[in-house]
Image (cartoon, coloured by chain):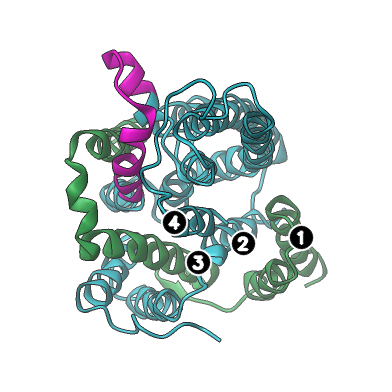
Amino acid sequence: MTLWQVVILASIATLAFKFAGYLIPQRLLEAPTPSRIADLLTVALLAALIAVQTFADGQDIVIDARVPAVIVAAALYALRVPFIIVVIAAALVAAGIRAVT
Amino acid sequence: MTDEGIRAAGDQPGGGDQVSDTPEGDGRGSAAERIAIRSGLFVGIATAAYGISFGALSVAAGLDIWQTCFLSLVMFTGGSQYALIGIIAGGGVAAGPSAIATAGLLGSRNAIYGMRMAPIVGIGPWWYRLAAAWGTIDESTAVSLAQPTGHLRRVGFWVTALVVFVGWNLTTLAGALIGDALGDPRAWGLDAAAAAAFLGLLWPRLKRVQAAAVAVGAAVVATALTPVLMPGLPVLVAASVAVVVGAFNWFGKEARS
């Protein structure tokens, strides 16, 4: 599998969901379970991605400069600091720790 | 912010199906229409700014500038785009199938948004419906559903979708060019920036106990499975936490104090 194939297939998959929404009859929405699962799916995938992006190094679990960076990011989000500033702050914390260690 | 907007809009009495098309009653050319346009512009510009971080992180993950721009043009749904590059960054092309599945699953909420938006954007030629589906994302849905009438909801949707689309693609290209010039992503802390970006997408969704419980459960599952499964798969398996909790509606009743 090439990177281009990954990019194109994943784009087709996400577009298919967008189109499906306009083709599926609306009464499906009235069934609460599918829409609740779709809502929670987003939460589960994002949380799992945060965990892996913070702790995984290949298949190893490591505690490194990313952990304090993510803690700082959480504190800034709690203070309602805008997304782009938090992302830059997290990068600076991790880069700063790596520069001095 | 997005989910709140949708829920707030859904909570208005009769908010779901107020569609009036008389020129006087629906806010055409009114102050309300200017508010709809302005909220679309603000949300659109604020969202487009994330494109810088996406472009830079994508190049750091190993995609080239063309692949990065292709994602923003065609996939055009930020969560899935970040997920794809995050998994490729961790597992390379070998994690491709997991990256495709995760990006696809994260995009499934757009189908729910599409069901709500279809009656609002209305009937039109195939290319009109296709453009509407393409532009159906968190932000355009939230701004649209926050407006009071059918016409204003259409205006809010299209303004937000167009501003985000143009801005997101321009800033993606800028971010990719910056990322390309930066070199070693770890020295710049870009791996931590990616985690912070995911956290920013998750944060507004944690208002309810059920969502917070799913987030903790999924994070624990993904971390525990990282040493035993190939990169990418732990995230996919963690998604089953949402399916189980959602199907049985565990933690569903209480509200977080």
Is residue B110 inside the magenta stretch? yes
Q: Residues in magenta?
A: B107-131
Amino acid tagged 4: Pro
Quadrant showing the N terminus of chain B: bottom right
Amino acid tagged 2: Ala
Q: Are marks 4 and 3 on the same chain?
A: no
> Is the magenta region chiefly helix, strand or loop?
helix
Q: Are marks 2 and 1 in contact (CB under 8 Å)?
A: yes
Residue denoted by label 1: A89
Q: Is residue A27 left or right of residue B134?
A: left
Of label 4 and label 2, which has the lower sequence position?
Answer: 4
Chain under numbered label 3: A
Q: Which chain is cyan?
A: B
Of label 3 and label 1, which has the lower sequence position?
Answer: 3
Chain under numbered label 1: A
Residue denoted by label 4: B13
| Residue positioned 30% across, 65% down in the render | A36
Residue B252 position in % (x across, y down): 33, 80
Disc 1 on helix, strand or loop? helix
Q: Is residue B82 left or right of residue A80?
A: left
Q: Quadrant of residue A12?
A: top left
Residue denoted by label 2: B196
Amino acid tagged 1: Ala
Q: Residues within 10 Å of mark 2 (few under 14, many from 20)?
A: many
Residue A60 position in % (x across, y down): 44, 74
> Chain A, which colour?
green
How many numbered discs, if any?
4
Chain under numbered label 2: B
| Mark sitting on residue A50 | 3
